Image (spheres, rainbow, N blue to C red):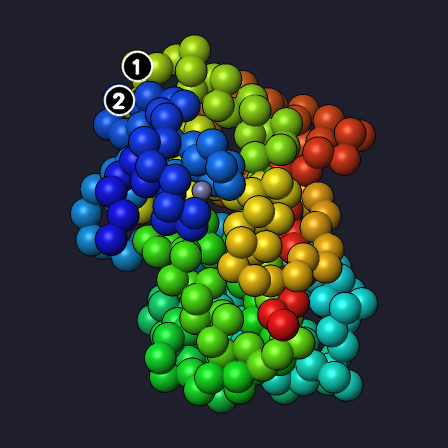
Amino acid sequence: MTTPDECCFCEASACPVVLRRPRFQVRRCPRCRVMWCDPPRFDDRFRPDDEEAYLEVEPTVVAENRDRLALLSAWAGPATHARLVEVGCMHGDFVGQAASAGYRARGLDLSTTAVAEAELRRPGLVHEGTLDESTPAASLDVVAAFNVIEHMDAPHRFLDHVRRVLRPGGVLVLETPAQESLYHHALVLRGQLLQRRPRLEIGMHPGTHIYKFGHSAWRRILAGRGFRVLAVRSKSTPLRELLAKNERAGLATRAGIVGLGLAARATGLGNRVQVVAQWS
Ligand SMILES: [Zn+2]
């Protein structure tokens, strides 16, 4: 059990506060560079990602999944890495596309409504749950987790499960928001300047985006847990998706999202990072 100022990945203690908000603070590990909310949540309610926003952006999700599959298959194609589980798969879009590409894919999600919708679309491929002791050891070739690890209470335990369920040579493919992005720097700066505004969006919040990783953090964390990092690349969320998720934001915020999105494309400093790592 870690204390609020202790890094759950590398156990560095007395990690400094880098951002103070009215109801919580953000700490950063000086060793592995991961950031997290202190406290991690205000209550025990489970808040899945906004399913309505997800539905609005489904056309972009298909293209995003095609891109994720291209990255995965460059390192672990279906001929050698067929047994795939996606954790936090929502309606099973990636699972369906991976199955069409030749993987023996299935998905897990904690949202009852998402699993019910997935069952209508792709019967039998998606189940309610997460990666835990019920998955046999060394039984999988690929674990996929796209924009889900930052929502976890104990992401270090999730990585322990991944190590257990992957066979030697199996691959973890993941995507999370990235600290290296222009979007992140702009949000943190705004959070520092406007410390008293409780509803200000800073890209992290107890109970939702609890952790923030990045290119550097993932390299350190995964190497520290015995993974061989095969690929780390920057990615920009489609603007349509970012705007759908900030539908209720003011005009200035939405204009800022468009400006930063265009700048990210021009500089290659996208708001997310994609990682492929091999368990040996
Ligand atoms: Zn650390």
For the residue marked with disc 2, what is the amino acid? Pro
Q: Can see residue 211?
A: yes
Residue occupying the far top of the picture: 193
- Mark found first going from the N terminus, 1 or 2: 2
Seen from the viewer's position, the closer of residues 177 and 222 is 222
- In this figure, which residue is indicated by the disc labeled 2? 22
Q: Quadrant of residue 180?
A: top right
Residue 7 shown left or right of residue 70 in the figure: left
For the residue marked with disc 1, what is the amino acid? Arg
Instruction: Identify which residue is drawn at 42% across, 43% down.
Output: 211
Q: Is mark 2 within 8 Å of ligand 1?
A: no
- In this figure, which residue is indicated by the disc labeled 1? 196
Q: Quadrant of residue 17?
A: top left
Image coordinates for residue 196, horizontal then vertical, percent: 30, 14
Q: In the rendered structure, are the residues bearing label 1 and label 2 in contact, judged by CB atoms less than 8 Å apart?
A: yes
Instruction: Identify which residue is drawn at 39% across, 72% down.
Output: 130
- What count of labels does the image hold? 2
Q: Quadrant of residue 69?
A: bottom right
